[in-house]
Image (cartoon, coloured by chain):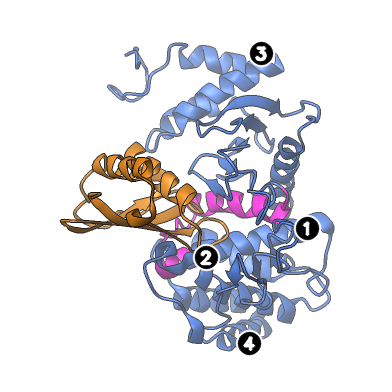
Chain colours: A blue, B orange
Amino acid sequence: MIIRNSCRHHAGHPVCFIVPPHILAHLAKNGTERQKNAALHNLHVTGQFRGQRQAMLAVWGAIPTGTERRTIYDAEGAEQLPGKLVRGETDKPSKDVSVNEAYDGSGATYDFYSEVFKRNSVDDRGLRLDSTVHYGQKYDNAFWNGQQMIYGDGDGELFNRFTISLDVIGHELTHGVTQYEASLEYHDEPGALNESMSDVFGSMVKQYAKKQKVKDADWLIGAGLLAPGVKGVALRSMKAPGTAYDDPKLGKDPQPDSMKGYVKGPEDNGGVHINSGIPNRAFFLAATALSPDGYAWDKAGPIWYEVLCNRLRPDSGFADCAQLTIQVAKDMYGAQGKSALQKAWKTVGL
Amino acid sequence: MADVHRVRVVQSGGFAGLTRHYEVDSAKLDPAQSRRLDDLVAALPHPPAGDTQQKGQPDRFQYDLEVETKSGARQWRVPEAAASPAHKALIDWIKATAKPG
C-alpha cells in the first residue's frame, strides 16, 4: 500500500516512503554496513522509477564516487525480485558459488569500466550493482530488467548456471550501460547493435580479467554455459559467427558472419541475438587490425565506447555504426585507423 | 469434443537467442489434460490490437502463441516481461506437456 507522505521532491508523485528520505540518507552515510545496505536499497528501489531519478540526486551524494556497491540476492527458485539479500559489499564469500560468481563478476565488470574508461558503474554515477541468482526453476536464461541483473540456474542438460561465465555477467551489465547511453531500441538492427555492444564489452571484461591479448582471446560468448555433452564450444563466436555449436538438441548456431546472411522475421525481436554476429565480427576484425600484438581495449575498445556513449542514436542501424566507428577511428588514430575500420566493415558486407 | 484443437508456442530470444517450438494437439491428450487445456485457454485475455514491443528488458524471452479452436485461430505475441498470469500458466503448461522441437 502506498502511503502519501509530505515528500519535498515531486509534488504528488506516487513513490513515497514510510521512512523519509532524509533518514535513509543519514543511515546510508553513517549506519552500520547492514543499515547502509538496507537504506541504500530502499533509496535505490524507489529511485529507479523513470523520471524520478533526478529527485534522488540529493541523497545519491551519500555514495562516494568511484566506489562500487554490489548486492546479491537469492530468489530461491521463485520469480519475485529482488529476493533475499545474501551478500553485500565487503561481506565475506558465501558458500553458494552462484552468489560469489555474481559478486566477483560484477566487480570485474565495474573494474574494467572504471580502469579502462573511467566510468563509474553502469550509469557513470556509481549505480549499485544488484544481482539476483537462483531465479525461477531450471531457468535457462539471464537478463537485465532495467534495474538489476537476474540469473537462472540452467536446466543442467543444455545449460549450466548462468553466473558461470564472466562474459555473460559483463554482457548483462553492458545492457545497463547501453540503456544509459545510446539507448538502442531492442529490435531489428538497433537491437542487434544493442546485443553486439553487450557481447563486445562483455568479451573485453573477460579478456581484461584474464589479461588476454587480442590474438590469445577465444572471442567466445558463454563458453562455460553449455552443459557437458552438448556439441559446441560456446553460444556465440565473435571471431567466426555461426560456428559456436551444432547439436541435436540445441540446433546449429544461426549467426550470420556478414550481411549476406542477415536474418529477418518476427522471432527474437527481429533476430537481435542472431544478427549481432555481424557487428561482433566487425569488432573482432577491427581489434585484430588495430592491435595485432596488443589488447582489444587499446584502440578498438575506445572507438566503440565513444560511439556507444556519444554518437549512436536509439534507432541507429549497422550502416550508422560503421560510418561512426570509421569516423572516430580516423579522429583517434588517423588514416591507419580509418582504413582498418573500413576494411573490417567491408568484410562483413557494410 | 474439446474446444481447443491445437496450441503452438514459439519461444525465441533469451540470452542464448534460441528458438524453440512447442505444440500440443488435444486429440493426443487424456480427458483430464484436455479439460485443463480448455480451462487455460478460456482464461486468456483477448489479443491486443497491435504487436507489443518489448521495452527495456533485454535478453528476455519472446513467446508467439497460437491457439486453434473450433471457432478459429487466435495469435498473441507475449513478451516474457509482460506476460499475464493466464498467458504464463498456459505457456508453462504447453512447454511441460509438449516435446520441444
Estimate the spatial distance between the alpha carbons at disc 4 and disc 1, rounded to whole Å.
26 Å
User: What residue span does the magenta drawing correspond to?
Assistant: A164-191
SS state under label 2:
helix
Label 1 marks which chain's residue?
Answer: A
Q: Residue furthest left?
A: B71
Label 3 in the same subunit as label 2? yes
Q: Do the residues labelled 2 and 1 touch (CB within 8 Å)?
A: no
The residue under label 3 is which amino acid type?
Gly
For label 4, the residue is: A339
The residue under label 2 is which amino acid type?
His
Does any portion of residue A350 appear in the rendered image? Answer: no
The residue under label 1 is which amino acid type?
Tyr
Marker disc for residue A273: 2
Estimate the x, y position of residue A178 in percent, counting from the top left: 52, 55
Q: Which of marks 2 and 1 is in front?
A: 2
Estimate the spatial distance between the alpha carbons at disc 3 and disc 1, rounded to whole Å.
35 Å
Q: Residue at (45%, 77%) from the top-left corner? A: A263
Label 2 marks which chain's residue?
Answer: A
Q: Residue at (57%, 50%) from the top-left corner? A: A141
Q: Which of marks 3 and 2 is in front?
A: 2
Label 4 in the same subunit as label 3? yes
Label 4 marks which chain's residue?
Answer: A
Estimate the x, y position of residue A325 in percent, counting from the top left: 56, 74
For label 1, the residue is: A208
Q: Choose between A67 and A144: the one closer to the eye.
A: A144
